[in-house]
């Protein structure tokens, strides 16, 4: 999120509000973030580790495949 947007995803005026936004996964996306990137970020931010995207799934995600630079 921070690499795409330029600021932390849950930043708030004070720590208490920041912690609340983190626990609620209160994430605001600017219009400049594509739907594919939004889906990827939300899949990575799952509280339940069983529902969270695995590394192997990450490699095959459409946003990663589209934006991965060949080395």
Image: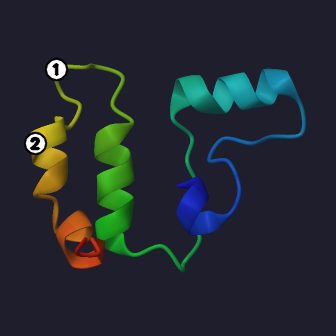
* In the image, residue 31 above or below residue 57: below
In the image, what residue occupies the spot 54% across and 80% down? 32
Badge 1: residue crowd in 10 Å (few <14, some 14–19, many ≥20): few
Residue 4 figure quarter: bottom right
Look at mark 1 in the image and give the residue it sits on: 50
In the image, what residue occupies the spot 69% across and 23% down? 19
Residue 20 figure quarter: top right
In the image, what residue occupies the spot 80% across and 40% down? 12
Q: Are the residues tagged 2 and 1 within 8 Å (C-beta)?
A: no
Q: Does any portion of residue 9 appear in the rendered image?
A: yes
Circle 2 SS class = helix
* In the image, residue 49 above or below residue 62: above
CA gap between label 2 and label 1 equals 14 Å
48 lies left or right of 58: right
Q: Does any portion of residue 29 appear in the rendered image?
A: no
Mark 2 vs mark 1: which is more N-terminal? 1
Which numbered circle lies on residue 61?
A: none
Looking at the picture, tell me which residue is in the foreground, 65 or 33: 65
Q: Which colour style is shown?
A: rainbow
Q: Position of residue 16 (x, y in %)?
A: 81, 21
Q: Position of residue 3 (x, y in %)?
A: 56, 60
Pair 2/1: label in front: 2
* In the image, residue 6 above or below residue 24: below
Q: Position of residue 30 (x, y in %)?
A: 59, 70
In the image, what residue occupies the spot 52% across and 55% down? 1
Location of the C terminus by quadrant is: bottom left
Circle 1 SS class = loop
Q: Position of residue 51 (x, y in %)?
A: 18, 28
Badge 2: residue crowd in 10 Å (few <14, some 14–19, many ≥20): few
Look at mark 2 in the image and give the residue it sits on: 56
Q: Residue furthest front?
A: 71
Q: Residue furthest right?
A: 13
């Amino acid at each position: 999120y921070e690499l795409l947007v330029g600021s932390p995803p849950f930043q708030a005026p004070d720590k208490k509000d920041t912690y609340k936004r983190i626990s609620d996964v209160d994430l605001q996306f600017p219009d400049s973030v594509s739907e594919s990137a939004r889906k990827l970020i939300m899949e990575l931010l799952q509280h339940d580790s069983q529902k969270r995207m695995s590394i192997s799934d990450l490699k095959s995600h459409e946003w990663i495949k589209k934006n991965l630079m060949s080395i």
